[in-house]
Amino acid sequence: LQGVVFGMSSRGRDGKGGGELWELFRLFTKLGFVAFGGPAAHVAMMREEVVTRRGWMGDQAFLDLNGATNLIPGPNSTELAIHIGRERAGWRGLVVAGTCFIVPAVLIVLAFAALYARYGQTPAGQNLLYGITPVVIAIVAQALWGLLKTAIKGWLTGAVGAVALALYLFASVPEIPLLFGAAVLVFVAENVRRRWWSGASSVAPPVGLPVGLLALQIPAALGGLGSLFFSFLKIGSVLFGSGYVLLAFLRSEFVGPGMLTEQQLVDAVAVGQVTPGPVFTTATFIGYLLEGVPGAALATLGIFLPAFVFVALTGPFIPRLRRSPTLSSLLDGVNVASLALMAGVTWQLGQRVVVDPFAALIGVAALVLLVRFRVSSVWLVIGGGAAGLAV
């Protein structure tokens, strides 16, 4: 990674390419260490850093990249980081941004896994989370407010977003039907309105899901490390949705054959959720339990590698998708449904974590500092954790 960042031939660190890579290196390494709260919070933090503070892109471009991550398998917030890196500095930026966002979380989870394997219990993080989670709620709420003004383009997208939110909260409709349903609904409605229905009906949504990987079978002759790598490669290639969907895949892949116990699986997911960065670092924890450090490295590589491939393949088509009068409505539908899901997750999380007046005070204070004084979300997360420990 150091070679990618600084090996820019004659341009070096001070040249255009090297300077952009160094900025990506610093930003996503920082986020990799402090991005608590799951994908919704990660998106909010990236929006704060990339759109508001640095001005690398506008809200519409950011929304399009975020919406595009929902059209391909893999960890959405990690793929958003990879997309941002690609937009900023090409394929080198793609590698730097994604790797720097993943590696800090992997190292932290690996340390927890070693402690767990030695002492047989999950590290406690409740005191930190007591103060951090209300801050995360405030960060997401502030980002949602800013993004909604761009995503809602009229009564149609507003209505679709409201229906998606209601279905998610009150009918427990899964994420994937909501995202693709909203995309198709806005696509059809907009093109009927433009009287393009005859041509639009033959255009299919650009969903990158390689059939070959869906049919991937792990050869029985592979050893433990090879089988572990291909198990996580398969999961990373076909998994849409949140960390809770990941839990179902992991249970089928590892608990069913007797490789892990139910308790070990729950502990692994818990560590992935309480540490910063992608929840998919649960793979690191499981890999370590099964095959030590080599297993942790291969499991991590397997589950995250498809995200880099999918972003590299689909990234060049996103601007064309937005410029197309016919197909841009697909992104509009995905964008508004994505924000509806973020709002739903924020509401559900807020109900669980704002358990007393002091937690509510932390959240309100964080929101005021964000909106009124533009304090960095990084410092707010650190301050919230310190407040939780103090209480």
Image (cartoon, helix red, strand yellow):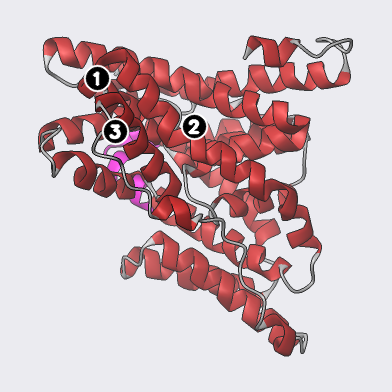
Q: Pick whichever of labels 3 and 2 is earlier in the sequence.
A: 3
Instruction: Looking at the picture, tell me which residue is in the foreground, 187 or 370.
Output: 187
The amino acid pointed to by label 1 is: Glu
Of badges 3 and 2, nearer the viewer stands 3
The amino acid pointed to by label 2 is: Ala
Q: What element carries label 3?
A: helix
The amino acid pointed to by label 3 is: Ser
Crowding near the residue tagged with mark 2, few <14, some 14–19, many ≥20 C-alpha atoms within 10 Å: some
For the point 77% across and 29% down, the residue is 89
Of badges 2 and 1, nearer the viewer stands 1
| Quarter of the figure with the C terminus | top left
Q: Separation of disc 2 and disc 1 at Cα?
A: 45 Å
* Image-quadrant location for residue 12: top right
For the point 71% across and 69% down, the residue is 327
Magenta stretch: give its range.
347-361
Q: Position of residue 223 (x, y in %)?
A: 26, 27
Does 139 appear above or below 150? above
* Image-quadrant location for residue 225: top left
Q: Separation of disc 3 and disc 1 at Cα?
A: 11 Å
Q: Separation of disc 3 and disc 2 at Cα?
A: 49 Å
- The answer to whether residue 88 is left or right of residue 26 is right
For the point 41% across and 69% down, the residue is 166
Residue denoted by label 1: 291
Q: Is residue 240 visible in the rendered structure shown here?
A: no
Q: Where is residue 81 in the image (x, y as percent from the top left)?
A: 60, 35
- The answer to whether residue 310 is left or right of residue 51 is left
Q: Which residue lies furthest to the front in this view?
A: 221
Q: Where is residue 192 in the image (x, y as percent from the top left)?
A: 70, 87
In the rendered structure, find residue 227 and report the number of the disc placed on it: 3
